[in-house]
Amino acid sequence: MAPQFLFGNLLQTGVIWRGEPLPNVLRQFQDKFGDVFQFWFGPARMVVVSCLEDVQHIFSHRHIYEQADVFDEKMKSIVPNSIFCLTGSKYKRHTTITHPLFRRGKIVNHLDTIINCTDKLLTRWRTNNNDPNYIHLNMFEQLQQLVLETFSLIFFDYSLQTMDNQGDRNRNEFAHAIYTVLNTIITVIKMPTFIGRLYLLLNLKYRRSRDLVNQHLYRMIEQELQETPMMRAERKKLSLIASLIASLQQDEKLEASKTEEDKKGLSRAEVLDEMLSFLIAGYSTTTAALTWFIHLMSIHPEVQNKVKKELAQYNMQSLSVEQLDSFTYLDCVLREMFRFVPPGFGTLRTLTVDDRLPSTGAELRKGDLVLIGIHNMGRDRRYWSGPVDPDQFYPERFLVEGNDANNNKAASISFGGGHRQCIGQDLARFEVKAICARLMQRVTFGDGGPEVNSGEYAGDEGDAVTPKRMGVTITFDPDYST
Ligand code: HEM
C-alpha cells in the first residue's frame, strides 16, 4: 500500500485517528499481502515478517540481524547507556553483568515479596470494594501499582508504598516521579523520534521527575557502597541494585580511558540507566499480561474454575516455589495467554548486510528494518491447526509438552528470540505466575458485561498491548478467612 507523506500507512489504516489496533492491521496486511510485506510506521519503513522459518533464520543470524537502530534513536535521549541502545563490545560488557541477575535461581528468592505485594492488593479489595456486584474499572491502574511495588522491592529493596495508600502517588515523591518518568517514556516511544526528543526537552515535569529519580537511584547506590563487604554479599540476594554494585568500576576515569574491549565493570551512570531500562521494559509488559489474565478469567469461567481446582488440591495459605512449579494447568493458561495476546505484538531488527529469507525468498537490503510479527504468528492457522481456532483462547493446546500435530509451540514468541531476546523473561514468567496463583487462591473474577469488558485491543500501543475496556467483578471465595 502506497504510504502517505508523514503518516505512512498509519492514517489510511485507521491506526491514527480511528484508533484501529496495530496488531489487527498487521494481520489484515498478512492476509492480503502474504508473509512478508512492507508497512510504513509514519516515515519509517518496516518489513514485516510473519513466517516461522524466516523468523527462525532471523533469530539465528545475529551478525546479519542486529538490534534495530530505532531503539538506539528512541532510547538514546532517555537511557543512552542501557542495553537497548548497545551493540558490539559494549553490549557484551553490559550483558555479561546484567544477564546473570535475571536467572531463575536468583528470581525465585523473591517469591515472598511478590506474594506479600499481591496480598496487599487483595486486602485493598476486601476492605474497600468487598461487594461482589461492584464492577472494577480501574484494574489496569491497580495492577500498575502492584507491578511497580514488586519491581521496586526486587530491584532496589525499597518500597514505593504504591500498595499502602490506595495508590496515592503523591504521598511518596519517588513513586510519583517514577510514574511520571515511565508514563512519559511510554508516550514518547509512540512519537516520531524528533518530536519525542523535543517533547522530552520541553516537558519540565518530566525533567524534574527524571532528576529526582536519578538522585534517588544515586543515593541508593551510595548507600549500598557504605555497607560492609559481608552485608553487601548478603544484600546481593535481596536486590538487583546490590548485585550491580559489585560490578561498579573502582576508577571510572581510568576505565573511560581504555578501549571498549578492555573495559571492565559498569560506571555509576551505566548502572543507573540499566536499572531504569529494566523498569521501562518490565513495567507495562508485565502489567499488560496481568490485566489480560484477569480479563480472560472473567470471560472464561470454566478455565478459571479449572485453575482454582488445581490450586485447591494444595489447600494452603502460603505458596512455595515447588508448589508454584507444580501448577501445570496454570502454566498452560499463561502460555496460551502469551500466545493469544502477547504484550508486544512485534520486535525489531536492522540488517547489517543484504540477505535473502529462506522460506519466502524475500530479498532484504542492508539497513532494512524488520518487524517480526509476534502477534501474527501466534494466530496463524498453519501453526495452530487444532480443533479450536487460534482466534479462541484455549489453554488445553499447551497440555502436551513440546510440539504436537496441531500446535507448533515455536510460533509463540512473546519474549522474542535469538541473542536479543528478553532478558527479564524468567522474572516476568515467575512474577506473573506467582501473582495469578495468589489471586486465584483467593478470589473469583466475573464478567462486568460487554459494555465495559470488551477485551478488544486498546489501539494506542506504546510498548505493550492492553485491553481497550476492562470491567470485572471480584468475589472473595468462601474459605478465604485471613
Ligand atoms: C510479560 C512481560 C514481558 C514481555 C512480554 C517482554 C517481552 C520482550 C520482548 C518481545 C523483547 C524483545 C526481544 C527480541 O527482540 O527478541 C524484550 C526485550 C527486553 N526485555 Fe522484556 N518482556 C517482559 C518483561 C521484562 C522484564 C520484567 C524485564 C526486566 C526486568 C525485561 C527486560 C527486557 C530487556 C532489557 C530487553 C532488551 C534485551 C536486548 O535488547 O538485548 N522484560 N522483552
Image (tube, helix red, strand yellow):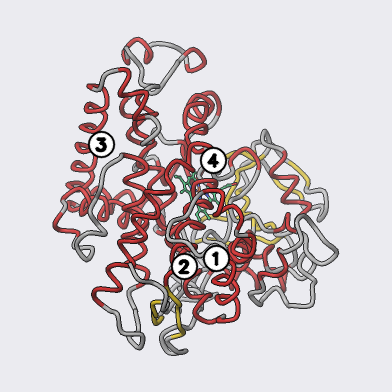
Residue type, label 4? Arg
Q: Is residue 240 above or below residue 327?
A: above
Disc 2 to disc 4, C-alpha distance: 23 Å
Identify the mark nearer the N-term, 2 or 4: 4
Q: Nearer the viewer, residue 397 or 351?
A: 397
Residue type, label 1? Leu
Q: CB under 8 Å between callouts 3 and 1?
A: no
Q: What residue sits right under mark 1 in the picture?
A: 311
Q: Is the C-beta of the residue carrying label 3 under 8 Å from the nearest atom of ligand 1?
A: no
Q: Is residue 323 left or right of residue 157?
A: right
Residue type, label 3? Leu
Q: Nearer the viewer, residue 447 or 444?
A: 444
Quarter of the image with the N terminus in it: bottom right
Quarter of the image with the C terminus in it: bottom left
Q: Secondary structure at mark 1?
A: helix
Q: What residue sits right under mark 2 in the picture?
A: 441
CA neighbours of label 3 inside 10 A, class few (<14), some (14 to 19), many (20+): many
Identify the mark nearer the N-term, 2 or 3: 3
Identify the mark nearer the N-term, 4 or 3: 4
Residue 104, disc: 4
Q: Secondary structure at mark 3?
A: helix
Residue 403 percent coordinates (x, y): 80, 57
Q: Residue at x 72, y 73 (%)?
A: 31
Q: Residue at x 26, y 43 (%)?
A: 158
Q: Nearer the viewer, residue 144 or 125?
A: 125
Disc 2 to disc 1, C-alpha distance: 7 Å
CA neighbours of label 4 inside 10 A, class few (<14), some (14 to 19), many (20+): some
Residue 371 percent coordinates (x, y): 61, 54
Residue 130 percent coordinates (x, y): 29, 80
Disc 3 to disc 1, C-alpha distance: 39 Å
Q: What residue sits right under mark 3 in the picture?
A: 217
